[in-house]
Amino acid sequence: MSKARWVFQWVRRFFGLTPNNKDLYLEQIFILTYHLGFTYQDAYNCPVWQRFWFINRLKHEYEKAKEQNQSPHSKSQRNTSGGRMFRKAF
Protein backbone atom coordinates (compact mmCIF):
# COMPACT_ATOMS: atom_id res chain seq x y z
CA MET A 1 0.00 0.00 0.00
CA SER A 2 1.16 3.47 -0.70
CA LYS A 3 2.00 5.99 1.99
CA ALA A 4 -0.67 8.44 0.74
CA ARG A 5 -3.40 5.91 1.47
CA TRP A 6 -2.26 5.45 5.08
CA VAL A 7 -2.21 9.20 5.65
CA PHE A 8 -5.71 9.54 4.19
CA GLN A 9 -7.10 6.99 6.64
CA TRP A 10 -6.03 9.14 9.60
CA VAL A 11 -7.90 12.22 8.32
CA ARG A 12 -10.96 12.99 10.42
CA ARG A 13 -14.23 12.48 8.62
CA PHE A 14 -16.46 14.08 11.24
CA PHE A 15 -15.65 17.38 12.91
CA GLY A 16 -18.02 17.10 15.88
CA LEU A 17 -20.58 19.44 17.31
CA THR A 18 -19.99 22.96 18.50
CA PRO A 19 -21.41 24.19 21.82
CA ASN A 20 -24.19 25.95 19.86
CA ASN A 21 -25.28 22.62 18.36
CA LYS A 22 -25.33 20.99 21.77
CA ASP A 23 -27.97 23.44 22.97
CA LEU A 24 -30.14 22.52 19.99
CA TYR A 25 -30.07 18.76 20.49
CA LEU A 26 -30.33 19.02 24.27
CA GLU A 27 -33.45 21.16 23.82
CA GLN A 28 -34.88 18.46 21.55
CA ILE A 29 -34.03 15.75 24.07
CA PHE A 30 -35.69 17.76 26.82
CA ILE A 31 -38.91 18.12 24.81
CA LEU A 32 -38.98 14.40 24.02
CA THR A 33 -38.35 13.35 27.62
CA TYR A 34 -40.55 15.93 29.34
CA HIS A 35 -43.58 15.95 27.04
CA LEU A 36 -43.52 12.55 25.34
CA GLY A 37 -42.08 10.31 28.06
CA PHE A 38 -38.95 9.20 26.20
CA THR A 39 -36.03 8.05 28.28
CA TYR A 40 -32.85 10.12 27.91
CA GLN A 41 -31.09 7.25 26.13
CA ASP A 42 -33.98 6.71 23.70
CA ALA A 43 -34.14 10.40 22.84
CA TYR A 44 -30.36 10.70 22.52
CA ASN A 45 -30.06 7.62 20.29
CA CYS A 46 -33.04 8.60 18.14
CA PRO A 47 -32.00 9.70 14.63
CA VAL A 48 -32.19 13.45 14.04
CA TRP A 49 -34.97 13.14 11.45
CA GLN A 50 -37.10 11.18 13.92
CA ARG A 51 -36.53 13.70 16.69
CA PHE A 52 -37.71 16.47 14.36
CA TRP A 53 -40.72 14.38 13.33
CA PHE A 54 -41.81 13.71 16.92
CA ILE A 55 -41.35 17.36 17.91
CA ASN A 56 -43.24 18.62 14.84
CA ARG A 57 -46.02 16.14 15.55
CA LEU A 58 -46.24 17.31 19.17
CA LYS A 59 -46.32 20.92 17.95
CA HIS A 60 -49.15 20.01 15.56
CA GLU A 61 -51.13 18.45 18.42
CA TYR A 62 -50.68 21.56 20.59
CA GLU A 63 -51.80 23.80 17.73
CA LYS A 64 -54.83 21.59 17.08
CA ALA A 65 -55.78 21.68 20.76
CA LYS A 66 -55.30 25.44 20.83
CA GLU A 67 -57.63 25.88 17.82
CA GLN A 68 -60.28 23.73 19.47
CA ASN A 69 -60.00 25.71 22.71
CA GLN A 70 -60.40 29.04 20.91
CA SER A 71 -63.56 28.04 19.05
CA PRO A 72 -66.74 29.46 20.59
CA HIS A 73 -68.26 25.97 20.87
CA SER A 74 -65.43 24.56 22.99
CA LYS A 75 -65.99 24.23 26.75
CA SER A 76 -62.46 23.16 27.72
CA GLN A 77 -59.80 25.44 29.21
CA ARG A 78 -57.05 27.07 27.19
CA ASN A 79 -53.51 25.71 27.18
CA THR A 80 -51.18 28.72 26.89
CA SER A 81 -47.85 26.95 27.46
CA GLY A 82 -47.76 25.10 24.11
CA GLY A 83 -46.50 27.92 21.90
CA ARG A 84 -43.63 29.04 24.14
CA MET A 85 -42.02 25.62 24.30
CA PHE A 86 -40.82 25.56 20.68
CA ARG A 87 -39.13 28.96 20.34
CA LYS A 88 -35.60 27.74 21.10
CA ALA A 89 -35.73 24.50 19.11
CA PHE A 90 -36.84 26.07 15.84
Image (tube, rainbow, N blue to C red):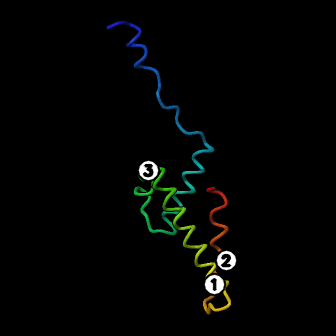
Task: Give the residue displayed 63% in from the left and 78% down from the top.
Answer: 66
Tell me which residue sits at (48%, 50%) in the image.
Answer: 48
Q: Which mark is residue 47?
A: 3
User: Tag 1: Cα neighbours inside 10 Å, few (<14), some, or many (≥20)?
Assistant: some
Query: Three-letter amino acid code at disc 2?
Result: Thr
Q: How many marks?
A: 3
Q: Residue at x 63, y 84 (%)?
A: 69
Quadrant the C terminus occupies: bottom right
Q: Earlier in the sequence, mark 2 or mark 3?
A: 3
Give the secondary structure at mark 3: loop
Q: Nearer the viewer, residue 67 or 9?
A: 67
Residue 13: x and y in percent read 46, 28
Whole-number angstrom distance, CA of label 2 to CA of label 3: 30 Å
The answer to whether 71 appears left or right of 40 in the picture is right
Q: Earlier in the sequence, mark 1 or mark 2?
A: 1
At label 1, the amino acid type is: Asn
The residue mark sitting in front, 1 or 3, is 1
User: Is disc 1 in contact with disc 3, using a CB cutoff of under 8 Å?
Assistant: no
Of labels 1 and 2, the one closer to you:
1
The answer to whether residue 53 is left or right of residue 70 is: left
Helix, strand or loop at disc 2? loop
Mark 2 neighbour density, 10 Å: few (under 14) some (14–19) many (20 or more):
few
Q: CA distance from mark 1 to mark 2?
A: 10 Å
Q: Residue 29 shows which numbered tag?
A: none
Of 55 and 29, nearer the camera is 55
Could you tell me how far apart the alpha carbons at marks 1 and 3 are, in whole angstroms? Answer: 33 Å
Give the position of the N terminus as an image quadrant: top left
Task: Indicate the secondary structure of the residue bearing disc 1.
Answer: helix
Q: Looking at the rendered structure, which numbered label has been put on residue 69?
A: 1
Residue identifier under label 2:
80
